Amino acid sequence: MSETFEIKSSIKNYEVSVIKGGAKLLAKEYSEFIVIDKKVHELWPKLNINNSLQVEAVESNKTLATVGELIEGLREKGATRHSIFLSIGGGIVQDVSTFCASAYMRGIKWIYAPSTLLGMVDSCIGGKSSINVGKYKNIAGNFYPPEKIVVDVDFCQTLTEQQLVEGLCESVKICYARSQECFDIYVDMVDLESNLHDLDFLKIVSLSLRTKKEFIEEDEFDDGVRLLLNFGHTFGHALEGASNFAISHGIAVGLGMISAYRLSTDLGLVDVSESRVKKLLDHVAELLEKVDGLTDTLNKTDMHVALEKFKSDKKHDKDNYYAILYDNAGNLVRHKFEKNNINEEYIVEAFNYLRIYKDEI
């Protein structure tokens, strides 16, 4: 069983295939130049990948230095401007691969096979990459989509439960941002009472990607409706940094959706009894309960440091903060609010709410 569709882009259209099995054939076809997550290489020896460029997928490697190493590696292997390389890995590998492909000899073709659920349901499409420079997270970026994307959901077999939760946090974010109908379809697919590894990931990934496709084709360069997909991210990126990345990206996005609720209520944007928001928060809270040690990590995280990380987000302007929040109908809105002491106290309260939300939702 598989599903294939096309993403329309002003840069170039590209194909997405969602399949169960087949990564081995892909690796064989593009065996000459492969960039792969080191952990995936260890977990999937049956891919029979030799002489690859391996990336340790940790946040500290999402840098220009890693991009430079990949460029050097491709050159040493004899890649030309007409070569195609295959990238296998999660979001960090995707980000450095996108940068590498766009820069190598002024741009070469590449193919992406996401190996994490988070990459499968969200980041693999849209052509967008971001890397860290110095102390600034995601400060440098570009748009450079691959020739095609092959999503093999069999990679989910070796993911941890926490990694599955990360992907599901991003998936529910996309579906909620689009419509009530899409959100309801997602919730019907994701039975949290069952073992997460038993979920139908082919259906979940297809739903998420087809939903995100609508956003990116309507707003390719992230200056309109696609901004709603930043839901949870302004808070989430701040939590990642404040915890020294003990809180991983997908988990931070889930927490960010909860913090957005608290800030929305403090700013008077949403009523605490709004049923659609409550349904989302209940689902996200149940997902996050599966993350071992999350309460302890939150208790150790300095939320005033999180505030400083929030304040440095690139989406703000000189006088105002911007965040994706809830309105009184439970829909998402890009809200502008003034930089002042009162609002900054609200932001800290929204972060602190993460320590008690389970008692209140």
Image (spheres, rainbow, N blue to C red):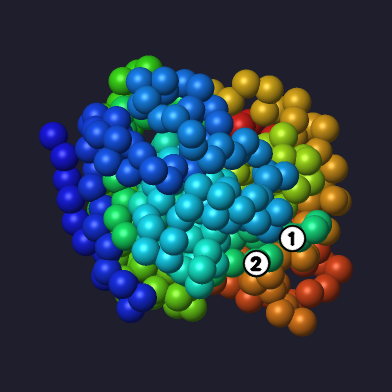
Tell me whether the residue at label 2 lies in contact with that at label 1, contact meaning CB atoms closer than 8 angstroms: yes
Camera-side residue of 245 and 147: 147
Residue positioned 24% across, 29% down in the render: 21
The picture quadrant where one finds residue 252 is top right
**Amino acid beneath label 1:** Val
Q: Quadrant of the C terminus?
A: top right
Camera-side residue of 22 and 285: 22
Q: Which residue is mark 1?
A: 133
Q: Which mark is residue 140?
A: 2
Relative to 34, 257 lies left or right: right
Residue 334: x and y, percent?
54, 71
Residue positioned 42% across, 23% down in the render: 44
* SS label for mark 1: strand
Q: Is residue 63 visible?
A: no
Q: Look at the picture and state if 355 lies above or below 85.
A: above
Q: Earlier in the sequence, mark 2 or mark 1?
A: 1
Mark 2 surroundings within 10 Å by alpha-carbon count, few (fewer than 14), some (14 through 19), many (20 or more):
some
Mark 1 surroundings within 10 Å by alpha-carbon count, few (fewer than 14), some (14 through 19), many (20 or more):
some
Residue 255: x and y, percent?
61, 43
Q: Quadrant of the N terminus?
A: top left
Residue positioned 56% across, 37% down in the render: 54
**Amino acid beneath label 2:** Ala
